[in-house]
Image (cartoon, rainbow, N blue to C red):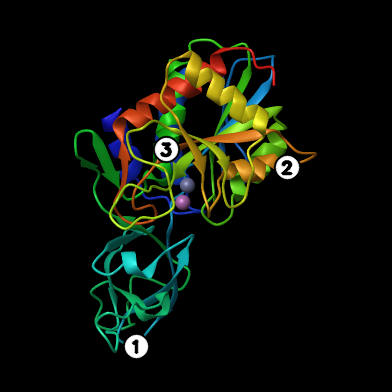
Amino acid sequence: MKTLLKKLTETFSPSGYESAIRDVIRAEVAPLADEVRVDALGNLIVRKGKGGKKIMVAAHMDEIGLIVTHIDKKGFVRFTGIGGVYPRNLPGGRVRFVNGTPGVISIEPADKMTESQPLEKCYVDVGAASDEHHPLKIGDVAGFERPFLDLGARWVAKSMDDRIGCLVAIETLRALKSTPNEVYFVFTTQEEVGTRGAETSAYGIDPDLGFSLDVTGWGDTPGQKYFEMSLGKGPAIKIKDGGMLSDPRIVDWMVTTAEKHGLPYQREVLLGGTTDARAMQLVRAGVPVGCISIPCRYVHSPSEMVDASDVENAVKLATALLSQPVEL
Ligand code: CO
Ligand code: ZN
C-alpha cells in the first residue's frame, strides 16, 4: 500500500492536468474492474458489479497548484493559485511545471518581519537571468514538489489531498471480491477548483446514492481550536461541511456498518470546505450522499499528514458498505 501511495502522491497532476495520475491509477485498477472508461472532462470511471443499486464513490485525483500570470524582465515568475493556495505555506518550497521545469518559491520582504504577505508578493525563481529564452509562458501550470515521507504510523506527502482518497478507492476495489450493487469508483478531475469533474461524472452515471472519499481537517495540534477530529481515531463519517449536509440515511448506513464490524469512526462537522459529494448531491433531481473522510493535518501544504490506521479502517468501512445490498 505504501509503495502505491508514494507513486500516487509523487505524480504531478494539478487540476485540469490529470493525465499523468490518470495513467497511474488506470494501470492499477484495470485488472480489478469490470469496465473502465474516461469521460469528456477526464474523469476515470471504474465499474464493478452489475444490477442492484447504482452507487458512486468519488475520489479526486487532481491536486492544488500554480499557474503563471506574468514573467518580468528579470525572469521572475508571478502566479495565481489553482485551488486553495495559502501564501504562508509557500516560501522556500519547490515546484515543478507540467513541462518539467523546476523552480523555487520566494516572497518579497515585508515591511515588518511578522507581517504575512499576500499571494501577489510571491514569485517563482526558475534560475533564469531574464525573460528571454525563458522556459515558461503565461498559463503554464505547476504542482508542488516534495517526496513522500514515511514516519511509520503516519504518512506525509504534498498531495495527500486527495491521493489518499484515491488509494482508499483502489484498495476497496481490490478488497471487493463481489458486490450485489453496481459500484462506480470515479477518480474525478478539477475538484480543487470547484468539484467540476464530479458534477459531470455524476450526471453521466445517474447514481441512486453515493459518497466521496476525501481528507478533512484536524484539531489535535498546538493552537488548533474548535475541531474535534484527531489522527488515529478512525476515519470520519461526515455529517456536515461548508457546502453540504450529508443525507441522514447515508450517515446511519455508515455508522451502523462501522459499529457492526467493530470499526472505529469519528463524527465530522467541518466548518469550511467541501468535497465531490456536494456536486453529486445536487446533480439532476438530487442524490442521497455522504462522505468518508480521512483526518489530515496541514491540508493544502506541501506536507499533509495522515495516520495509517485511519486509512486501513476507511478501506474496511468502504468495503463493508459496498459488499452488502443497500436499503436506505
Ligand atoms: Co483540497
Ligand atoms: Zn480534497
Mark sitting earlier along the chain (3/1): 1
- Residue 165 drawn at (x, y percent): 44, 36
Mark 2 sits on what residue?
Answer: 283
Q: Quadrant of residue 290?
A: top right
Residue 46 showing in the rendered view = yes
Residue 23 visible in the snapshot: no
Kindly identify the residue that appears in the image at 29 percent across and 89 percent down: 111
The residue located at (27%, 71%) in the rendering is 126
In front: mark 1 or mark 2?
2
* CA distance separating discs 1 and 2: 47 Å
Image-quadrant location for residue 87: bottom left
Residue identified by numbered label 1:
73
Counting residues from the N terminus, which is met first, the one under dot 1 or under dot 2?
A: 1
In 3D space, how far apart are the residues under numbered discs 2 and 3 (Cα atoms)?
Answer: 24 Å
Tell whether circle 1 marks a residue whose Cβ is less than 8 angstroms from ligand 1: no
Q: Amino acid at mark 1?
A: Lys
Which quadrant is home to the N terminus? Answer: top left
Decide which of tag 2 and tag 3 comes sooner along the chain.
2
The residue at the far front in this view is 226
| In this picture, residue 255 sits left or right of residue 14 | right
Of circles 3 and 1, the one toward us is 3
Please give the residue where the numbered disc 3 appears in the rendered image. Answer: 294
Relative to 128, is 227 above or below? above
Q: CA distance from mark 3 to mark 1?
A: 44 Å
Label 2 SS:
loop
- Quadrant occupied by the C terminus: top right
Picture coordinates of residue 222, whole percent (x, y): 28, 55
Amino acid under disc 2: Val
